[in-house]
Image: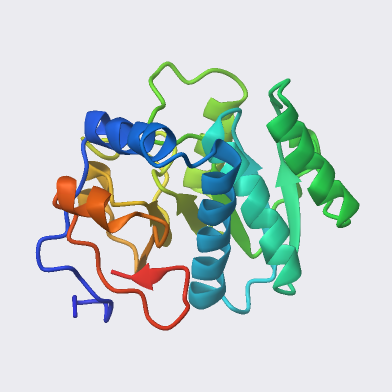
Amino acid sequence: MNRLGGIMGKGLRYLTQTEAIKVDQELFNEYRFSVDQLMELAGLSCASAIRSAFPEATRVLVLCGPGNNGGDGLVCARHLGLFGYSPSVLYPKQPDKPLFANLVHQCREMGIPFVPVDAVIPGEYQLLVDALFGFSFKPPIRAPFGSLIDAMAASSVPVASVDVPSGWDVEKGPPEGVSVRPKLLVSLTAPKKCAEFFDGPFHFLGGRFVPQKLAEKYSLDLPEYPGSDQCVRI
């Protein structure tokens, strides 16, 4: 057990950005996972972790970026809706790709509203889900994402970050000054180095899809997942 009551692997590894990219590529190339498969599993893991950490925070705003982290957020929003939450999505820059268009369509068909940046009302939400940027992001941060990150950093509403808190260096952690300080971090596949700087109350791992051979190759020493759970507290 760690100090937060979670299950910590004896030698649980925190991946560098290069290692995280290599693991991802092996999942695609060696194990033949598709992007949408991994996105579905990641988003489900995030929604499950949110349900465990914030069962009463049903009014949720999911902030989605233009990459795969944003796709994870869209899947997360859909599953939160199925879990009885009332999610809304803020998705200012939508990629022109069928995968993301399909995810948007699925959310809309489930009645999940998409809200523009200027329509967000302070205090309307009980939880912000930070799905703007993942481990492959490299600066600079372009508009409107800088202002969204600043808004999350300044908000009194708790933040749940998907894999990497937006604005953080994947390895060096939060920048100097005001930054996003999530209450919940959901590390995907394995924690990234920046997770060593996380000081919030809830840290979950979502990576039950990782093949044992891959975990052994990178000495990930992943914890056991209880029952049929898609995430585990670490």
Left or right for 107, reference 69? right
**230 or 177, nearer to the observer:** 230
Q: Where the C terminus falls, by quadrant?
A: bottom left
Does residue 118 appear anywhere in the picture? Answer: yes
Image x and y of residue 10, in percent: 10, 68
- Count the marks: 0
The vertical placement of 98 against 205, above or below, is above
Residue at figure coordinates x 24%, y 62% from the top left: 222
Image x and y of residue 225, in percent: 35, 74
Left or right for 65, reference 102? left
Does residue 123 appear anywhere in the picture? Answer: no
Image x and y of residue 75, in percent: 65, 51
Q: Where the N terminus falls, by quadrant?
A: bottom left
Residue at figure coordinates x 76%, y 53% from the top left: 88
**205 or 112, nearer to the observer:** 205
Residue at figure coordinates x 63%, y 72% from the top left: 57
